[in-house]
Amino acid sequence: MHLVRDDHRNGGEVTLADLPLGPWAGVSVQMWTTKTGQVWHADPECTRVKVRGREMVHRQPESGGLDQLSLPDGLHCNPPGALATYLRAADKLLRYGADTQAAEARLADGDLDFGLLGDDPHYFWSAADEVLISGELAAYWEAARRRRERLVEKVRQ
């Protein structure tokens, strides 16, 4: 997924590499496999884990972007709390940007997306929304909102 930057530098795309690690910076995340050893879990309350298999601690980098997270292949669930909330916020941000970019492309082809006119990205408020408006991702979120608002204005015209 890509988020288009408000200032359009370097092609205008914001990716996971651009988004800061936030609460993931420098933490150690304990993970374990199921009995088969093929699926990893980081949420101790995950209902899919009946019997724990191998355990491993994944130390996260001190700095960088979310693309630098150290996570095993086959990860079923994220750690609970602030870490999972931050990833949900980043995912929402990237999806929102990708949707805006796709709608801009459709508009350029003459297709008016009237669904944008009633758009409210915070309709179902969650902890991830709080991260988007007040945390380390807030500047990225504001840029995405401004871009969407400009697009909505074009559709209205």
Image (tube, rainbow, N blue to C red):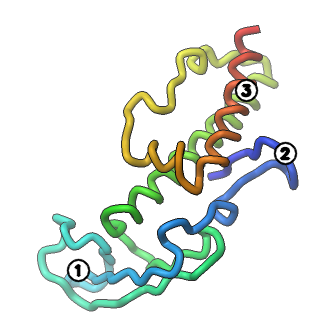
The answer to whether marks 2 and 1 mark residues whose Cβ atoms lie closer than 8 Å is no
Q: Secondary structure at mark 3?
A: helix
157 sits left or right of 121 in the view: right
When the figure is inspected, residue 122 is found, relative to residue 130, above or below; the finding is above
Q: Residue at x 33, y 83 (%)?
A: 30
| x and y, in percent, of residue 75 in the image | 38, 72
Q: Secondary structure at mark 1?
A: strand
The one nearer the camera, 67 or 73, is 67
Q: Amino acid at mark 1?
A: Thr
Cα distance in 3D space between marks 2 and 1: 44 Å
- Between discs 3 and 2, the one toward the N terminus: 2
Question: Mark 1, residues whose alpha carbon is within 10 Å: few (<14), some, or many (≥20)?
Answer: some
Q: Quadrant of residue 62?
A: bottom right
134 sits left or right of 52 in the view: right
Q: Secondary structure at mark 2?
A: loop
When the figure is inspected, residue 80 is found, relative to residue 121, above or below; the finding is below
User: What residue does disc 1 label?
Assistant: 34
Q: Amino acid at mark 2?
A: His
* Residue 53, disc: none
